[in-house]
Image (cartoon, rainbow, N blue to C red):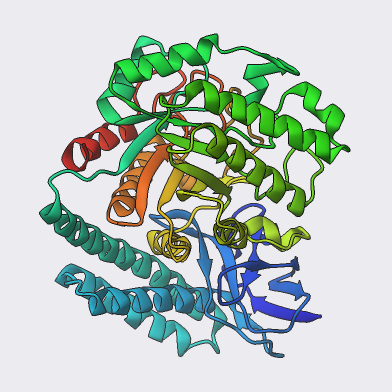
Amino acid sequence: MGQLRFLVSRPDRLPNSAVERIYSAAYEGIPLRSQNRQSHSTLILDRDTDDSVAVFVPWRVAGHGELVLSTTSLMEREVPYHLEVELARGTLSRLRNQQAAWELAGLDVSEEFRAQYTLASASFCQAATCQSNPAEAADKAVKSIGQTLDASELLVRDYTRQVLAARHQQTAKLPTLLACNVEEQPLDDASAAALLSTFNAAVIPFSWRDIETNPGQRHWTMHDKQVQWCRGHGLRVCSGPLLAFDAAHLPDWIYLWEGDFENLHSYVFKYVQAVARRYAGSVQVWHCSGATNVPGAMRLTEEQRLRLTVAAIDAVKAADASAPVIVSCDQPWGEFLHNQDLDLSPLHFADALVRADLGLSGIALEINFGCWPGGSQPRDLLEFNELIERFAVLGLPLLVLLTVPSASGPDPKARSQAKPVGDGDEAWTPERQDDRARRMVSLLLAKPAVHGIIWNELSDAKPHGYPHGGLLDAQDRPKPALASLTKIRHEHLT
């Protein structure tokens, strides 16, 4: 049993429920199990190991909202660490490391970045050298964190601009897929106009719950119309996920087979194969399974979820051998691991499928940004970049399924129980959604490993997955993020 302790001088910077969302991670960034508690001004992490780890902490940053920041690797010691100073150290260290890596690869950083970096470094030095006065050190560290994140955004801006310019020297328009989930309902005029002006592809979920309401009785009318509409308007069609273990996708009758895995396996294979056979030649990308790396509405072991994922892949390959096949990992940072007894991180789950040589064409990362629990806590762009690079090591093309909230209040039409994190000055707004979406999508386009970007929700006016994640609001009016994505599409994509 190990323990890490931190002195917290600025508890106002810790958001609501921050203590339960804090986690530690080793070198690979995979969260480790811990029990977190706060005693007066001391934060305590009780762990199963005494190894050195980095600690990831939700933190309020003026001008940036709530973000998960991390320390450098810390060993156990008797004297508590100063949390603010260690978060400032970790944030600045990540920036230094990424700057060095990108400059080594040929990046020309701007003078604006260098000036901001100098300010951040000076503030951190002041914080680190006055820790005998915790309040003063905390104030200097908080200042350094804000300055470092400002510098990080400038560095990512320099990287994105230069890499996109280099990519456009090879091709006028990038072949990257930019798609949106159209759900399983007719598109009204507003939704259709938004889709056609912004995206070069559409995602049709083919939800098992909607198609097979009773065993063997399948209903195709709505899905036939969706496929025909997309193809008639020149949109490439992506499917799925065909298999997902959340209540919104599973038919009610399938729970009868929860304790009979062999029959469950048979039903999964038959359903996925039926969809693939019907739409073979009409679907350009088959998304076989989604979020099967996390526990769902059925009581299944990790091995069983892996086996059912393989069954879905095999069923599609048997019905449409030529079309690309992908699977997706939900919550790819793996925050859920710190309080759940699971063996496989999202990266290890994906790696197991890749090593099995099943004929996968790509791996998708589902990032429901800024939502908790069940989504991904918000992070800065350097952490986002590091996640993409980590999964790119698998050697397959990547797709990113993305949503970002535009409000922090209740959303009665959202199916997920996840809530947007942040309140007060850190609350989500349409403008914050726009800013975050624009920066993230631009960075993804600069990544040659990323072959597709899918916005997971089109409209808040219809039932949808995560709160306030649509590009149209509850009255089907366009949000600012829609215009930004439209501009990105016309500047960079076919």
Give the camera-side residue of 310 and 418: 310
Q: In this view, does 86 lie to the left or right of 491?
A: right
Which quadrant is home to the C terminus? top left
Q: For the N terminus, which image quadrant?
A: bottom right
**Residue 217 visible in the shown view:** yes
Q: Residue 373: image x %, image y %?
A: 65, 46
Residue 489: % across, % down: 24, 37
Q: What is the total number of numbered labels drawn onto the structure image?
A: 0
**For this rendering, which residue is in front, 90 or 243?**
243
Residue furthest toward the right? 259
Compared to 143, does 445 lie above or below?
above
The residue drawn where x is 48% and y is 76% is 90
- Position of 10 compared to 114: left or right? right
Indicate the position of residue 201 as horizontal and vertical percent values.
34, 30
- Residue 206 visible at all: no
- Residue drawn at x 61%, y 46% is 372
50 over 415 or under it: above or below? below
Left or right side of 103 for 337: right
Q: Is residue 178 left or right of residue 346?
A: left
Q: Name which quarter of the figure residue 264 lies in.
A: top right
- Hey, which quadrant is residue 152 in on the image? bottom left
Q: In this view, does 233 lie above or below 203?
A: above
Q: Which residue is drawn at 43% across and 57% down?
A: 396
Residue 429's place in the image compared with 253, above or below, is below
